[in-house]
Every structure is written in structure tokens, then in C-alpha cells.
Amino acid sequence: MRLPGFRLTFGFTVTYLSLVVLIPLSLLVWHTFNLTFTDFINTVTSRQVVASYRLTFTATLLAALTNAVFGFMLAWSLVRYRFPGRRFIDAIVDIPFAMPTAVSGIALTTLCANTGWVGYYAEKYLGWQLAYTPTGVYIALTFIGLPFVVRTLQPALEDLDKDVEEAAEALGATRFQTFRRILFPAVLPALLTGFTLAFARALGEYGSVVFIAGNIPFSTEITSLLIYTKLEEFEYPKATAIALVMLVASFFSMLFINLIQWYTSKNN
């Protein structure tokens, strides 16, 4: 059954989507056509650009996986347990949402530099240099992606029926068996959604990374910074070419993750 006003609302939706998403993306493709095919290939496959791809996707994937694990543990603790300071910790989770990314980058750099509270002891006792290394990029991407996993999982965990857990215990299931066979499959779609959101958010991050990364070509230079550098040098076609590759790669990455999520939801 169609809702009243379907044509009007659908037309408004398509128009709004075109203005906000489709037209800007089409302009991205249009500017890229100013390059010849050979120049396009040379631009997007240069050693510096490929190195930025490698760092960006590797750090993004590791950050999203880290957030999936520890974000689940944090969401579980906030939903299932009552303890002093719980509301305070719950509020802290949203800080990466509210804080400007540049402020996040400066704060993380100050904390992780070799003179910072964390960076000093990490380098002195463990021999780890955190800031101005790929590790710094990973830390920044993990920081900005954590709230997506926690806030996606919390409603799913709150909706779990505790009677099912009690029934499993009555039938002799251990806590691990109850978690693995009942609880985890129920929240897996939400976990995958949170992972996808964290991955997508980190993939295009700029502000929080640019300070802590050090921006060393072939080492700590992320793709979004490289695009910005090309724009500053007025090399617009090259900037849009690199951006187009990231757009296509991001689309297929999200498509793959969403297919996994759809398959998981279907089998549950």
C-alpha cells in the first residue's frame, strides 16, 4: 500500500539527494575528465599516492576492528552493569562527536608526543614513538570512530530479552555458550553497522589526523591530506582523480560490508 503523497515525497527525496550528493559527485567526475587517460593512471598510481592509499586503508581497517572489539565491551558494560560514574563515562563516549576534529588532533598530538603524558612513557619504557608515525594515524582514527560502535550497539543490547539468557542457563548452558550462541548472533547486525560507520568515518578523516601524523610522504601521509595538497597547488584535476579513486574504493568497501551485514541478518 502506497502512502499518501508518495510522488511528492519521492520527488523531493530525489531532488534533495541530487543537490546534496549526486551533483557534487558528478562535478568530481567532470573535473577528472580534464586529464587524459594516461595522466589519470600516472596520477592515481604514483608511488606517493599508492603509499597514502596503503596507510589510509590499513589504519582505517585496524581502527574500525579495534573499535568493534572495545566498543562492544564498553557498550556491554554501560548497558548491563550499574556502577559509580557510569553516566559520566556514557557522556565521555560522545566527546569525539562534539569536539572539532582539529581540536582532537591537537589534543592527541600533545598527549602522544615524546613530551606528552602518554608519549613520553611509551617511548622511554617501551620504545614506542606514537606521534608522527603510522601509529599516531591509527590512534586518531580509533578515537573518532569509537562513538559510532558504542551508540549503535547500545539499543541492540538494551532490547535483548534476559529471559532467553535465563532459559539457556536453566538448560545447562555456560556463560560463554550463552554469549556465543544467543547474545552475539542477536547483536551481530548492530555490531557490523557500527563497524561500517566507524570505517566510513575514519576513511575520509582529515582534521584529527593531520596534526598527529607528521605528514611525511611515503610514511605518514594520508590520502585526504594528499588531495588537499593538490588543491593548494591548484592541481584540481589530479586532486579530483585521487578523490575519485577513493570514492570508488569506499563505495565497494561499504557495499561489501553491507552485503555481509545483510547475509548475517538474513541467516539470523
Image (cartoon, helix red, strand yellow):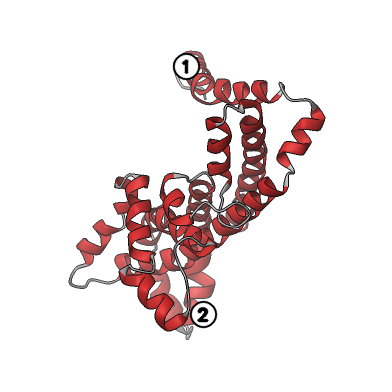
> What amino acid is at disc 2?
Gln
Give the camera-side residue of 132 and 85.
Answer: 132
Give the camera-side residue of 250 and 107.
Answer: 107
Vertical relation: 198 (above or below) 1: below
Numbered badge on residue 177: 2
Coordinates of residue 68 in the picture (x, y in percent): 48, 62
Number of callouts in the render? 2
Coordinates of residue 173 in the picture (x, y in percent): 48, 83
Q: Which residue is drawn at 30% across and 66% down?
A: 78
Residue 170 visible, this angle: no
Vertical relation: 171 (above or below) 258: below
Q: Which residue is drawn at 71% across and 21% down?
A: 34
Q: Nearer the viewer, mark 2 or mark 1?
A: 1
> Which residue ends up furthest to the left in the rendered image?
84
Question: Is tag 2's residue or tag 1's residue first in the polypeptide sequence?
Answer: 1
- In the picture, measured across the screen, residue 53 lies left or right of residue 45, that is left
Give the camera-side residue of 57 and 22.
Answer: 57
Q: Quadrant of the C terminus?
A: bottom right
Q: Are discs 2 and 1 less than 8 Å apart at CB?
A: no
Residue 194 visible, this angle: yes
Coordinates of residue 21 in the picture (x, y in percent): 53, 26
Q: Quadrant of residue 233?
A: top right
Vertical relation: 235 (above or below) 19: below
Q: Residue at x 28, y 72 (%)?
A: 81
Coordinates of residue 67 in the picture (x, y in percent): 46, 62
Local crowd at mark 2 within 10 Å, few (<14), some, or many (≥20)?
some
Q: Which structural element holds mark 1?
A: helix
Q: Which structural element holds mark 2?
A: helix
Residue at label 1? Answer: 12
Q: Which residue is drawn at 57% across and 37% down?
A: 227
